[in-house]
């Protein structure tokens, strides 16, 4: 396994999942504050009120990153910390937090990778229809301008949106994330507005952060048919189009994937989508961020109305605590597909990782052999993609810390650092130590 000398080795988090300080220094409410307080929506009634208290502990947290030897940290800005009402009045204290965070990263020799939107929409905007409202494109543009004009000089890497698939479909079609809708028309409308918002935001960031790289992060699943039947193969293709290409095609080609479009249009779910606008999503980007976790095993099911499919499980495979199959080849296939189909100038693997039910810390370490193995299997897949010519420029382990795993609350732990949520004590897991050693070994090659 070998990586280019200038490869970026990083870890990632997001604002709502780690910051806490939900009511501090003028932060406005986010949709996740509301959702997590709605009974039955988040496991154990957990909220992000305190999370990892990263808002107060970031200097110590950055020291831990420096010990790991990472040279990149991907974090997100909380929109309601900066614009408590979503638009209009700027909360300078919110901006100041990110300035201090970025200064501390720079001092530690760690390059900041800033995501503008990782799911904590201001509740005030949700009350005006959220991403369903066509005005959301202008709201996001205003927010992009505020953040990039304040931090543009200090940040060399910008990500507009994290996982528009999850923002639209998981939150508004499946109802699992805030705001918890189950409405296909809303979900596809939101997906459309997100793509337009991305297209509008990139030139704004570029104008305010000259010379910076700007991109978007799309979560990719690798889809295999459950059996070798033609029907299952076609179903796997439909799922890939739904999950991946519905967002990739707008970003790289300014269109929606024709095969899925032809299936969805007659069903009326695109009733509020002006298809002629989608070309606005295609603006030059400097990199694609890829989040990869697992593969999907897809089978044809004509009884399921929208896509005509459902899922199987590889009973011989290994699975994480979320029952996600450990499938490193899917990362390689995904990267090759992206290179062959879309030719991104550069790819950062902006998330890759796994949840396991770890034991308690003992003698200053948490033994997490499955997670260490997960990384041990996925890093070679990335290296192999590079060897085959895919321009992968960096890798960010998800996540630096155990944190608020959305609807799973604090129950599912993705960190390479264990967090004791009662004391906020951080303890390295064996996977963190292995990651540190891997980074050091790659640097001395
Ligand atoms: O925790 C999330 C993250 O916020 C987005 N990508 C997937 C991770 C694991 O579910």
Image (spheres, rainbow, N blue to C red):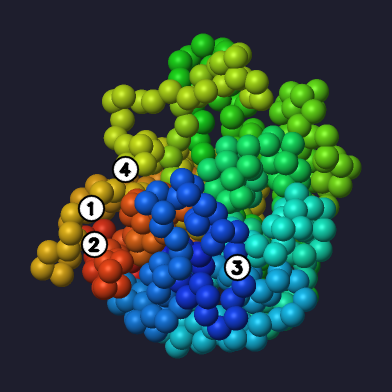
User: Image height check: is 234 above or below 33?
Assistant: above
Residue at the spot x=41%, y=54% of the render? 45
The residue where tag 2 is placed is 429
The residue where tag 4 is placed is 321
Residue, far left: 363
Q: Which mark is residue 358?
A: 1
Drawn side of residue 125 relative to residue 95, left or right: right
State the residue in front, 159 or 9: 159
Drawn side of residue 118 relative to residue 136, left or right: left
- Compare marks 3 and 2 and give the one earlier in the sequence: 3
The residue where tag 3 is placed is 29
User: Image height check: is 243 above or below 435?
Assistant: above
Question: Could you tell me which secondary element the residue under label 4 belongs to?
Answer: loop
Residue at the spot x=72%, y=41% of the render? 186
Mark 3–mark 1 distance (CA, rounded to whole Å) = 32 Å
User: Image height check: is 372 above or below 314?
Assistant: below
Task: State the image quarter where residue 113 is shown.
Answer: bottom right
Name the quadrant of the C terminus.
bottom left
Residue 120 at x, y = what percent?
Answer: 59, 62
Mark 4–mark 2 distance (CA, rounded to whole Å) = 16 Å
**Disc 2 residue lies near ligand 1 with CB under 8 A:** no
Give the mark toward the camera: 3 or 1: 3
């Amino acid at each position: 396994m070998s990586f280019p000398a200038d490869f970026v080795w990083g870890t990632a988090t997001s604002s709502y999942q780690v910051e806490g300080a939900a009511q501090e220094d003028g932060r406005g409410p986010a949709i996740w504050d509301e959702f997590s307080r709605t009974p039955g929506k988040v496991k154990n009634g957990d909220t992000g009120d305190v999370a990892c208290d990263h808002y107060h502990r970031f200097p110590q947290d950055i020291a831990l990153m420096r010990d790991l030897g990472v040279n990149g940290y991907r974090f997100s800005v909380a929109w309601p910390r900066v614009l408590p009402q979503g638009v209009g009045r700027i909360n300078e204290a919110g901006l100041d937090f990110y300035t201090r965070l970025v200064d501390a990263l720079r001092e530690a020799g760690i390059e900041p990778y800033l995501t503008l939107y990782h799911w904590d929409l201001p509740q005030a905007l949700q009350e005006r229809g959220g991403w369903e409202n066509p005005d959301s494109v202008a709201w996001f543009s205003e927010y992009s301008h505020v953040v990039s004009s304040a931090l543009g000089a200090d940040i060399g890497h910008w990500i507009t949106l994290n996982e528009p698939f999850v923002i639209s479909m998981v939150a508004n079609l499946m109802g699992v994330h805030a705001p918890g809708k189950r409405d296909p028309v809303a979900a596809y409308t939101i997906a459309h507005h997100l793509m337009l918002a991305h297209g509008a935001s990139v030139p704004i960031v570029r104008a305010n952060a000259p010379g910076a790289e700007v991109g978007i992060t799309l979560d990719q699943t690798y889809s295999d048919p459950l059996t070798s039947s033609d029907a299952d193969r076609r179903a796997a293709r439909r799922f890939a189009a739904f999950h991946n290409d519905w967002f990739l095609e707008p970003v790289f080609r300014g269109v929606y994937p024709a095969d899925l479009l032809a299936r969805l249009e007659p069903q009326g779910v695109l009733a509020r989508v002006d298809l002629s606008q989608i070309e606005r999503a295609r603006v030059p980007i400097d990199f694609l961020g890829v989040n990869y976790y697992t593969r999907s095993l897809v089978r044809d099911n004509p009884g399921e109305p929208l896509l005509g499919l459902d899922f199987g499980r590889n009973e011989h495979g290994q699975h994480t605590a979320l029952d996600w199959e450990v499938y490193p080849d899917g990362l390689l296939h995904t990267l090759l597909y992206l290179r062959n189909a879309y030719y991104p100038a550069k790819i950062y693997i902006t998330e890759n990782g796994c949840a396991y039910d770890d034991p308690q810390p003992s003698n200053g370490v948490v033994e997490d052999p499955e997670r260490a193995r997960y990384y041990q299997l996925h890093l070679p897949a990335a290296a192999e993609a590079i060897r085959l010519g895919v321009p992968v420029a960096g890798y960010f382990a998800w996540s630096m810390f155990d944190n608020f795993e959305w609807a799973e609350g604090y129950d599912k732990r993705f960190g390479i650092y264990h967090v004791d949520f009662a004391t906020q004590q951080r303890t390295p897991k064996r996977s963190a130590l292995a990651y540190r050693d891997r980074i050091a070994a790659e640097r001395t090659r």
